[in-house]
Image (tube, rainbow, N blue to C red):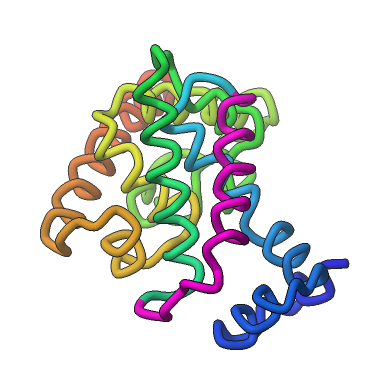
Amino acid sequence: MGSFAGGGLPPDDVVVTALRAGDETMFAALLDTWSGGMLRVARSYVSTDHSAEEVVQDTWLAVIGGIDAFESRSSVKTWIYRILVNTAKKRGARESRTLPWSSFEQDGAAGAGPDGVPAGWKELAEGWPTPESEALASEVRGLIAEGLARLPPRQRIVITLRDVEGCTSEEVCEILEISAANQRVLLHRARTAVRGWLAGYFESVKQPE
């Protein structure tokens, strides 16, 4: 099971051929590689972890049902994430959403360092003190979760895909079907807002010299 996961997935044409042939090993490798990130993205649209899990399950069912019609106009990853986002949007529209991002706080997010700050934000965090205890790192993760929850939905999903899930700007534009300029503006506004909230926190906890 998941024999590709350790060394990365094979090229898209190999993935598609295997899925069309009902290759369970390939499907397991995709699950291992992408399901965690898909859950985080879905969770930014819906109100509970259970709903996010159902969105991901529905997405994989749609992938299996639609793989024969896949035309390779985009990568397999962006195609799957586009299905995910559309599925999550429909589910979220039926719910009363409250502070999505609790799951981010629980696992610290993909790519987060020991200080709780996602790797994609290191250039923004220059000059911030590094939390020296697990308790403080946990508090920072909680602040990031709270800050992301405050963002407008479009900013939140862009920063999630770019900085938490590590998608490229091109992938985000394809997944969300937005222009490159729009993606840049949304990402800049989201990063600026989160940086401001975190900078204010770090300033308040600085020890006097």
Q: Residue at x 37, y 19 (%)?
A: 204
Q: Which residues are magenta?
A: 49-73
> Taking 62 as reference, is 15 left or right?
right
Q: Is residue 123 above or below residue 59?
A: below
Q: In the picture, residue 25 is in which quadrant?
A: bottom right
- Camera-side residue: 52 or 180? 52
- In the image, residue 70 above or below residue 158: below
Can you say which quadrant of the picture contains the N terminus?
A: bottom right
x and y, in percent, of residue 140 in the image: 52, 28
Left or right of 23 on screen, residue 30 = left
Q: For this rendering, which residue is in front, 62 or 2? A: 62
Residue shown at the point (64%, 87%) measured from the top left: 14
Residue 93, placed above or below residue 81: above
Residue 207 seen in render = no
Q: Nearer the viewer, residue 147 or 203?
A: 147
Q: Is residue 54 magenta?
A: yes
Is residue 146 visible in the rendered image? The answer is yes
Asked whether residue 173 is drawn in magenta, I would say no
Residue 20 position, x and y percent, is 65, 76
- 25 displayed left or right of 9: right
Q: Is residue 97 shown left or right of residue 59? A: left
Residue at 42% across / 62% down in the picture? 167
The secondary structure that most of the magenta stretch takes on is helix
